[in-house]
Image (cartoon, rainbow, N blue to C red):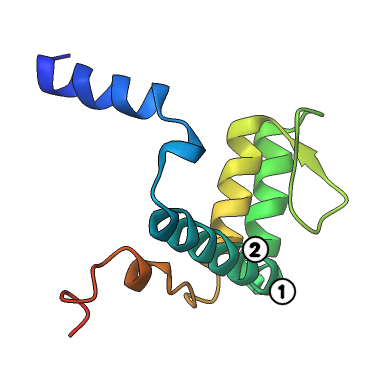
Amino acid sequence: MDKGMDKAADFIMYLKWDQLPGAVRRRAKMCLMDNLAVTLVGTLAPVSKIASRFAVENWGCDEASIIRRKKRASAPGAAFANACAANGLDLDDDAIFTRSPEQRK
């Protein structure tokens, strides 16, 4: 890695939640709640069912949970299935929360 990447990695690795400004923490919580909500509803989408089945068949083990399924897979498999659910209905809106008020105009 170059020095810039090392500095960025160190900043992220050593950053503590309480070091963040209150506005940043509130926005992070909004993004997390938005993503969780769309992931839960996305589990109802056909792509979520297909991805879950695929993950279990190809990365099956008892390592990680697939959201709202009584199935488990390896960590990469569950991440794949859960990501498909998160984007299943393409409702996520958290990108708007990552922009400054000036950028939202």
Residue beneath the point at 66% across and 41% down: 78
> In the figure, 29 relative to 105: above or below?
above
* Relative height, residue 98 to residue 61 (above, below): below
At 37% from the left and 69% from the top, the residue drawn is 97
According to the image, label 1 marks what residue?
A: 44
Name the image quarter holding residue 74.
top right
At 74% from the left and 54% from the top, the residue drawn is 67
Q: Nearer the viewer, residue 13 or 25?
A: 25
| 65 to the left or right of 98 | right
Give the quadrant of the C terminus.
bottom left
Label 1 packing within 10 angstroms: few (<14), some (14-19), many (20+) = some
Q: Amino acid at mark 2?
A: Ser
The x and y percentages for residue 38 are 59, 71
Residue found at the very far right of the displayed protein: 70
| Distance CA(mark 1)–CA(mark 2) | 7 Å
Indicate the amino acid at tag 1. Leu
- Front residue of 14 and 49: 14
Instruction: Determine the secondary structure under disc 2.
Output: helix
Say whether marks 1 and 2 touch (CB < 8 Å). Answer: yes
Quarter the N terminus occupies: top left
Number of numbered discs: 2
Whole-percent x, y for residue 22 in the image: 44, 55
- For disc 2, the marked residue is 48
Indicate left or right for 88 with 6 as reference. right
Residue 84: name its quadrant: bottom right
